[in-house]
Amino acid sequence: MIKERVLKKPRAEEKEPPIDRRCPTNAATHSVVCVNLKADQNSWHRDWPRHQLDELLSACSVNPHTPEEWSRGHQRFQRPADEFEMKFWNPGFREPTASGLLINLTTQSCVLSHDLLPWVRGVVAVKSLVGDFVDVPYTLPPDWQLETLKNAWLDLETTADIKTPDPCPRNFLYSGPSEFFVDQLAAIFSSSPTRQGEWKPPRNWQWFSIDPPEPNANHGVSLAKLFEELCGRWILGPHGNGEASRPGAWLESHRLWIEHDLHDRQLQWVRTGVCPPPLSTQDSAYRYSGMGPHESWIYQELLHDLVRFAAAEVLYRPKSTRDERVREVHDRRETWMATSPSSIPSSHLAKEIVEYERRRIPWSLTTEEIADHCTCGFCRSLALQVEPVFFHLDSESSTTRRLFSASSNFSRAICPAFSERGRQNKKSLFGDSDLDLRSLQAECLSRGRLLLQSMESMETCQHHSSLIVLSDWTRYRPTQILTSQECSVICDQLNRLIREELPVHCMVDWVHESFQNLKDYLHAHPSVARNGCRPQR
């Protein structure tokens, strides 16, 4: 067991880090850790409370490359900026004699002593509107490494393993398709003619990004298939040297991290009642990150429009020059980005949606936007929620050979209720419904009623035994607490429905999730079920 050394009193010019009053007051909890911050050849050190290590690590979620960016990273968690300013750090590297942490902005790594692992929880305490502290998760970028100490601290001080941020290829990704589509279509249409929306591939033609479609015996394949093939060829690349010339790599490089980071910000909004501060346009996470799910969706929709526009330029303006055609497609791109996609429930422009995601601003919908987008019972219930309702765009892009689906629309807008981002993420639409038993019970009741209402018109499912069990509970037990065994019965019945081919399969899974959460809660808190509780109506 490592003994905690006694630290001498800080000098007058140093400021002691704040103590979280919510934590126990024993000496072990309030022991301090020697923290070193390194950027290029410069180092700083400071003592920090052991139980607040996540406050330091959470700032790395903005992918900082400079101490100033790292200091700004704390502002997303609504922390006072002066707590983390560099003027409170001492210059130079100090070798820890006990527990230590090194945040290296140059190598993008966080190295900590083995005994500190239990203190890194992946959540940071954020103050809410009512004045209490709530836990908010954070997600480190994929390029960052969190590891325990393997060598001496002094070996890390002189490390030469330096990572430099890759240049952002956005200009190339948005400008390149104009020339690519014009050149490809000019060559394709000159070698084989089109007829009534169909195109006859030449004998030596090969399909690279999609499976070969069935040709019409008299004419050929639909132009929609050709356009799908060209979009796939552009994304799969390469179109030059280096990874920056491979659009597919950049579509997937940071997508999952940005998706998780957006979800963290949504949870923060729900738990604190305040929209989180956005990233600065000067932050590395804004300048160097790849595309998130929303920008990927917008980008694919843009390609879908540009390839058709380029085809019209080639087919119906045969006397125009290549430069004129490319210029027209460039103008079309700017016009399209300054419009609102018709398939989303808001008036936001395409370029605004991209900007929101790059700055990690959660995309919330108003009651009017939800009602205008969808009139199903589920979305109507969302419109009545007091907590913010978030919208997600999901794309089917991947780096596999079959890049898009067989339909002409290779991306789609998802109903705001079902973001299809995983079971644990759907809770954000209703806030933290698993925080207490009251909200869990109310969630089960409201979701169960919505499922029953949506299936009233379906004669084949109206008297299904699984729905009768659910209907009996929503009718006769609305103010009582289910036992863990009763939750198990309902979950088993819902599992049977999930295995059947029902039009509301996704909603059944959604209801099953809420009952499973209630079941797990009751199993972990058996005394609560015995005492009883009235759910919120």
Image (spheres, rainbow, N blue to C red):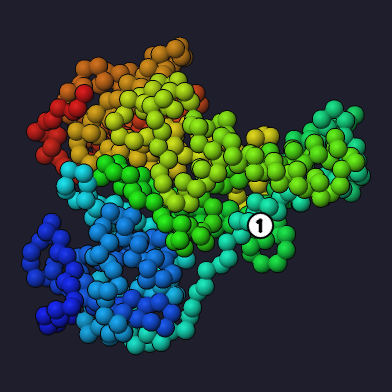
Placement of 75 over or under 443, stated as above or below: below
Q: Quadrant of the N terminus?
A: bottom left
Q: Position of residue 192 (x, y in %)?
A: 91, 41
| Residue 29 quadrant | bottom left
The reply to whether residue 156 is in sight is no
Q: Position of residue 416 (x, y in %)?
A: 44, 33
Given the image, on which type of amino acid does mark 1 rest?
Phe
Placement of 304 over or under 154, stated as above or below: above
Q: Residue at x 31, y 60 (%)?
A: 74
The answer to whether residue 137 is left or right of residue 417 is: left
Placement of 485 over or under 381, stated as above or below: below
In this view, the residue in front, 12 or 511, is 12
Q: Position of residue 366 (x, y in %)?
A: 39, 30
| Residue 141 quadrant | bottom left
Placement of 165 over or under 250, stated as above or below: below
In this view, the residue in front, 516 or 25, is 25
Q: Residue at x 23, y 55 (%)?
A: 125
The answer to whether residue 267 is left or right of residue 315 is: left
Number of numbered callouts drawn: 1
In this view, the residue in front, 327 or 124, is 327
| Residue 152 quadrant | bottom left
Q: Secondary structure at mark 1?
A: helix
Packing grade of label 1 (10 A; few <14, some 14-19, many >=20) is some
Q: Position of residue 222 (x, y in %)?
A: 79, 33
Q: Quadrant of the C terminus?
A: top left
Q: Residue at x 31, y 84 (%)?
A: 92
The answer to whether residue 84 is left or right of residue 429 is: left
The reply to whether residue 314 is in sight is yes
Residue denoted by label 1: 172
Q: Residue at x 50, y 36 (%)?
A: 348
In this view, the residue in front, 485 or 293, is 293
